[in-house]
Amino acid sequence: MDSDLGPPTAAPSLAQRLPAELDALAPYARRLAASASFPVDPEDLVQDVAERALRYAHAFDPAQPLGPWLRRTALRVLLDRRARRRREPQRLADDDEPLARTHDGTAEREHVRRLLAPLSAIERAALIGFHAEGRTVAELAARLALPAGTVKSHLHRARRKLAARRDGGPSDAG
Amino acid sequence: MPAERPHDIDRDPLAERLDRALDARRDPFEDEAVLAHLVEHPDDLAEIERLLARLDAIARVEDGRAERERASAPDDGVRLDPRPPRPSRPSRSSATTRRAGVAAAALLVLALGALAYRLVAHPTPDAPRGRAEVARDDTASRAETASRDASFGAPPTSPATRVPEPGGRVLDWRVTTTVRRPDGTQRTIRTPDGTRGDAASTSSASDHPVLIAWSETWPRR
């Protein structure tokens, strides 16, 4: 007697796979939210990801794993929010909350002075020349009488030292 | 090994990816390598933002210092401003201004004349629109608003917020509503136009089973 195999089963759609993947996405969303420089509700982030995933389901290759695609989407959603916040003017969350803004640059200058203190003179020159003055590596190499590769290495080392400092300041609010 | 290659730089994957993006003056958050790193290591987002904020602060402070130096530069009597001194007599620019004023006045006269012609030749109808017509429009508008308000807090606004769903139904993903879960807790979520992402709602189950299934798994606070 031949067994009836029935019709071939279609691969589950993205919408069918999404609920299980959203559960797995939640911890990632919490880590992203904790790492962001502005308030993010992880559940709200997951909601946005679900919406965007459904909206762009046609762009998803069903042969690929869904998890990394959703994580990438979550990251994109968060970065889009970050970009919107940077474009929009500052708003008061509450009329009673004063804007945390200082018009005196003294605090920021002191903060930058502390940031640059651990850098050598050449590292400082490379960092300021490249990021503040907008000079190219070639221009800095000519100014400092160093090979371009050496200037780059000083620049990279300066960035690492800058990123490594843990003390916060008025400009670290992001 | 080229003499220029550094020998003491730490092999930090994120730092290397950031360096490549920053060296090319690309926004790190638009760099594929950085994004790929963050997909696997979301905690590093804070480090990137901190570095970018500090670079911005350094640029601001250096800009301010350069401005102060320029402002405090001694004046040795040599005129650095390339603009010529203001003439003491009326210049050609005054005549130009007068001509512009005359042209504007002429336009105003023409506009008033056109308005007057319209009022005289084509008076506003004395009779308003029919009461039935007005009432019909009002009722339709109120019904539409009430229908939306009953389902969710804010009505959809511009067409830009409406996106087509596969299958042709248009959804408004920007509409929000506050949903009360069966256990009494509340959550503000976005829902498709006319439906609610709530386990208690039956109308949305057939439209968006994913949202329903997901909402049922939300952890209780």
Image (cartoon, rainbow, N blue to C red):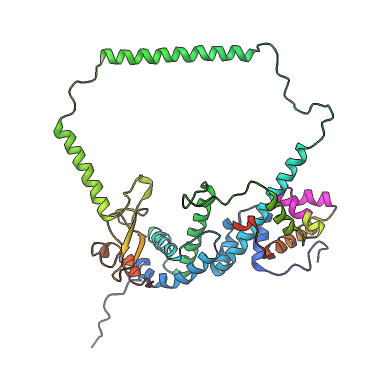
Residue B51 falls inside the magenta stretch: no
Split into 4 quadrants, where in the image is the C terminus of chain B? bottom left
Decide if residue B173 is on the left or right side of residue A67: left
Give the percent coordinates (x, y) of residue B33: 60, 62
Q: Residue furthest bottom?
A: A1
Quarter holding residue B191: bottom left
Q: Residue furthest left?
A: B132
On screen, residue B89 above or below B200: above
Seen at 57% across and 52% down, the residue is A100
Q: Position of residue B143 (x, y in %)?
A: 21, 46
For the residue pair B17 and A112, the one nearer the viewer reads as: A112
Quadrant of the image containing the N terminus of chain B: bottom right
Q: Quadrant of residue A7?
A: bottom left
Q: Is residue A103 visible?
A: yes
Which residue is at a point 30% across and 71% down the rendered structure image? B183
Where residue A155 appears, as percent x and y from the top left, is 75, 58
Residue B162 location in percent, x, y? Answer: 35, 50
Relative placement, left or right, of A63 versus B176 is right
Numbered range of the magenta stretch: A125-145
Q: Is residue A147 above or below residue A71?
A: above
Q: How many marks overall?
A: 0
Identify the main secondary structure in magenta: helix
Residue located at (50% from left, 49% from top): A91
